[in-house]
Image: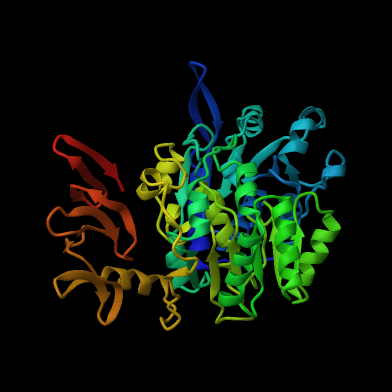
Amino acid sequence: MKQIRLYDYRQDMLANIISVLTDGNLQVVRVGGRNVRQGCSVMVQMPTGTGKTYVMASVVKWFLGNYDEGEVWIVAHRRELVEQMQQTLGRFCLDYGENTSVLKAKVRVRVLSIQWLTRHAGELDNAGSVPGLIIVDEAHHAIADSYQDLFNRHRLALKLGMTATPCRMNRKSFGGLFGRLLTSPCANDFIMRGYLSPYDYVVTGKFSVDQLTVNLLKGRGSDGDYAIREMDERLNVPDAIQRLFDSVRRYARGKKGIVYAIDIDHAQAIAACYNALGLRSVALDSKTPAKRRKDMVEAFRNGEIDCLVNVNLFDEGFDCPDVEFIQMARPTLSLAKYLQMVGRGLRVNKENKDKVCMIIDNVGNYRKFGLPDKPRNWESMFAGLRAGKGVIPAYVRKVQDIIAVSDEMVTVKKADTARKKMTATQLKEYLMSVTKFEQDGRWGLRVNDDVIVKPIYTYLSGFKGDYAVCGIGMQRPSFGLIDRRGNVIIPLEYRDVHLRNEHEVRVSRSYGDSKTIEL
């Protein structure tokens, strides 16, 4: 087998995975009122672009080298992801069985779609094909009954789930499938260490036509997200599509990128407009023949196409490091979808080490989720204590009759390309050196002369661990919580915030109305 080279953070994750999976190999769980033995299981969270497939391939290699019996089943929820996984294994010289000949294959690694596996489960059992390790790619989909049936049929197998976003909009817990969650550093750390690309971020104005249109969306689909039909009716109109093009022309001229559309009609309308105005574009979706999709992606890589307009095709599993801009033309309430979309542009391009991805948010997703590299409380979402759902700003919920005043885009982040890339130790020391400073009666954060947050707070406490209480306002101040990077962890909407220790904070909106939040 080919040697798999792992960066330090990947080596650490691999070691942690192996430690969990070998912790007695079997664990006892309560099922239907009785104790049942099952193989150890773990879900792994790593941001898009940081090498989940490298870690996964390393786990496969570890299992094959240490267990003489049992196959490895790598399971994905879409055929496109199966094909990519096969290519990944091929790069590391790991033999695998094709779907069409899986019952005849004399190999120990099988790459399968969950749909194929569900239809052929009995045939696999009859053929004596028994998994010793089940790996679920894009494991945030594993809540589906088909995955639960798979796990129940093979209780004794070790189980590993890989995802960038261990969360569900409906706040369902993954605890019934995976015994542990392992998380990697946040995306901001990877950017500061040079493992992800820095980015600029622009968003449509708070009172723009497109933002106010999104604010008025009322329908919800079966998954809890915005209703496709209503989005298409309101946003798939010539004026809105022209504004999409104007944004690309202004902020990403000369770059190539990916546009996320609402549905097939929207994608085709965008591509037609862009082509007519000189931007070489193609619309792709799940119904596009596989060969054409492959040819168009290759043309994109070769610079023959400037823009791939897609529908739910490149938000998962698309590996192309030379994506220079991301444009969101579809709003979403799903944190997972948001991070998967923007994550496609954050992969480092080794041939263009100065790459800065431009993220163009024409539908105001930023206002529901914050920036892509904002730290997230994945443990709470994994446990089902918090939904992986965007928070609609209060002004949207209260005011509907606002008149659009400007279609200008607003810059919310400008990449810091001057900062030197850091090692893990340097990054830790850098963040621990963050201190507050005062200017004209307001407080900010800095490390020496490097300003992390400009002086905007009227109150800022000292840090306990990674967090500090911040406040805005003089007469009736509102309080929240920030971390050492300046990210707002708890919105500034509380009457009182008391940081008990580095893992727990007490918040209250009024006297007698308080709650404790775990960090």
Judge from the rendering whether residue 164 lies leftward or rightward of residue 282; answer left or right.
left
Quarter-of-image position of residue 450: bottom left
The picture places residue 68, in percent across and down from the top left corner, at 69, 44
Q: Residue at x 21, y 42 (%)?
A: 509
The picture places residue 187, in percent across and down from the top left corner, at 46, 62
| Residue nearest the observer in this picture, 7 or 395 | 395
The picture places residue 183, in percent across and down from the top left corner, at 45, 52
| Residue nearest the observer in this picture, 163 or 30 | 163
The picture places residue 219, in percent across and down from the top left corner, at 55, 38
Judge from the rendering whether residue 119 lies leftward or rightward of residue 328; answer left or right.
right
- Report the residue that reaches farthest toward the top: 33
| Residue nearest the observer in this picture, 154 or 173 | 173
Q: Residue at x 48, y 53 (%)?
A: 212
| Residue 160 visible (yes or no) | no
Q: Is residue 15 above or below residue 428?
A: above
Q: Residue at x 76, y 53 (%)?
A: 83
Q: Is residue 54 above or below residue 226?
A: below
| Residue 220 visible (yes or no) | yes
Judge from the rendering whether residue 270 lies leftward or rightward of residue 488; answer left or right.
right
Q: How many numbered marks appear? A: 0
| Residue nearest the observer in this picture, 238 or 186 | 238
Q: How is the image coloured?
A: rainbow
Q: Quadrant of the N terminus?
A: bottom right
